[in-house]
């Protein structure tokens, strides 16, 4: 893979939202949503990551933590837009837009719940097992964290309303694969690609678990409140390291040596993605084209 191939491979990313897909390039964010009348609503905004504004923010590990926070904020905004456009017109009249304060509260609540379920609770459960050895303590702590992630994914896959979201997730992956392969992206071309993508956020979650085990083993067994606070302070650096590992997965040489680290994420994606329909691929492709076209910046439009 040449440097140019890698830049092309890494310059666009996406995420499934309700009845739509959000795509992100280095200079723009585009969200495309299938409206109740069958048309596609597209909102495009200019975007420049903090990692591109100052060299300090683009240092390895630091940039990963920043990208994680940015992605969460962007995803929340995309979800808000998708909900607004996916609702019938009569429902929109009865509801007001989500305020900035509500968005901040939602983001804070989601981060707090994630911390509680995937870091604090596994730690407390591991402490009940009375391990003295720090290595085994952190190994079991990581196993419980991994188990919670699998349970979380399994539970949401039982939710029938999530089926179409997972199909849009698959459409996003297929579209990005087709784009990375070069040439014009069409539903017919995208359909031939895999719905499992190694740089998916699902894979990222599992890499976070594996990296956290290694980092926490180095920190040892937490014996006091300061020990626990130190442990929790490493969550963002762990996310940053995991981002670097995920980014390396774009290199074939790394995949050959460390492919085992990405295999569990691909396996889990069999649950979090579905085979999309052509109309869902059309939405993903519309988002892709919009985020790559500078002429569409700061616009909101509807296409047939």
Image (cartoon, grey):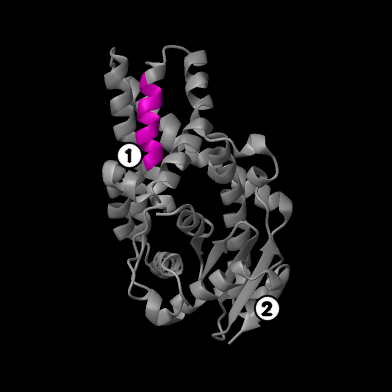
Does 10 appear in magenta?
Answer: no
Query: Where residue 103 appears, x then y in whole percent?
Result: 66, 52
**Residue density around tag 2, few if under 14, some if 14–19, many if 20 or more, within 10 Å:** few
Q: Can you identify the residue that label 2 sits on?
A: 301
Q: Identify the main secondary structure in magenta.
A: helix
Q: Name the quarter where the C terminus is drawn.
A: bottom right
- In the foreground, 225 or 286: 286
Which dot marks residue 146? 1
Q: Which quadrant of the structure image shows residue 205?
A: top left
* Depth check, front residue: 128 or 235: 235
Q: Is residue 223 left or right of residue 130?
A: right
- SS of the residue under disc 2: strand
Does the magenta run of residues contain 216?
yes
Q: Taking 157 as reference, is 94 above or below it?
A: below
What residue span does the magenta drawing correspond to?
207-217
Where does the image place residue 2, in percent across and percent down from the top left? 44, 54
- In the depicted structure, whether residue 103 falls above or below residue 165: above
Q: Earlier in the sequence, mark 1 or mark 2?
A: 1
Measured as percent of width and height from the top left, residue 299 is found at: 72, 72
In the rendering, which numbered label is found on residue 299? none
Relative to the observer, which residue lies in front, 204 or 92? Answer: 204
Nearer the observer, disc 1 or disc 2?
A: 2
Assign a secondary structure to mark 1: helix
């Amino acid at each position: 893979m040449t440097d140019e191939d890698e830049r092309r491979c890494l310059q666009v990313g996406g995420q499934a939202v309700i009845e739509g897909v959000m795509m992100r390039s280095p200079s723009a964010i585009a969200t495309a949503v299938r409206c109740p009348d069958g048309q596609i609503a597209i909102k495009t905004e200019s975007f420049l990551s903090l990692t591109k504004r100052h060299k300090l923010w683009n240092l390895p590990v630091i940039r990963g933590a920043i990208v994680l926070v940015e992605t969460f904020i962007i995803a929340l905004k995309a979800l808000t837009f998708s909900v607004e456009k996916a609702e019938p017109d009569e429902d929109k009249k009865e509801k007001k837009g989500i305020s900035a304060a509500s968005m901040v509260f939602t983001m804070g609540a989601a981060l707090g719940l994630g911390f509680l379920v995937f870091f604090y609770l596994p730690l407390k459960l591991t402490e009940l097992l009375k391990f003295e050895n720090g290595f085994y303590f952190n190994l079991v702590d990581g196993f419980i964290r991994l188990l919670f992630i699998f349970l979380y994914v399994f539970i949401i896959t039982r939710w029938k309303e999530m089926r179409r979201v997972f199909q849009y997730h698959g459409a996003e992956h297929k579209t990005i694969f087709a784009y990375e392969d070069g040439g014009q992206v069409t539903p017919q071309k995208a359909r031939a690609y895999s719905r499992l993508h190694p740089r998916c956020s699902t894979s990222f979650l599992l890499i976070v678990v594996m990296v956290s085990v290694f980092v926490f083993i180095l920190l040892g067994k937490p014996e006091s409140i300061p020990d626990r606070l130190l442990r929790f302070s490493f969550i963002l650096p762990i996310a940053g390291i995991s981002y670097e590992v995920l980014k390396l997965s774009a290199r074939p040489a790394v995949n050959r040596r460390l492919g085992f680290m990405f295999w569990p994420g691909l396996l889990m994606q069999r649950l979090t993605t579905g085979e999309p329909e052509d109309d869902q691929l059309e939405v993903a492709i519309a988002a892709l084209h919009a985020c790559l076209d500078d002429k569409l910046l700061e616009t909101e439009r509807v296409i047939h």
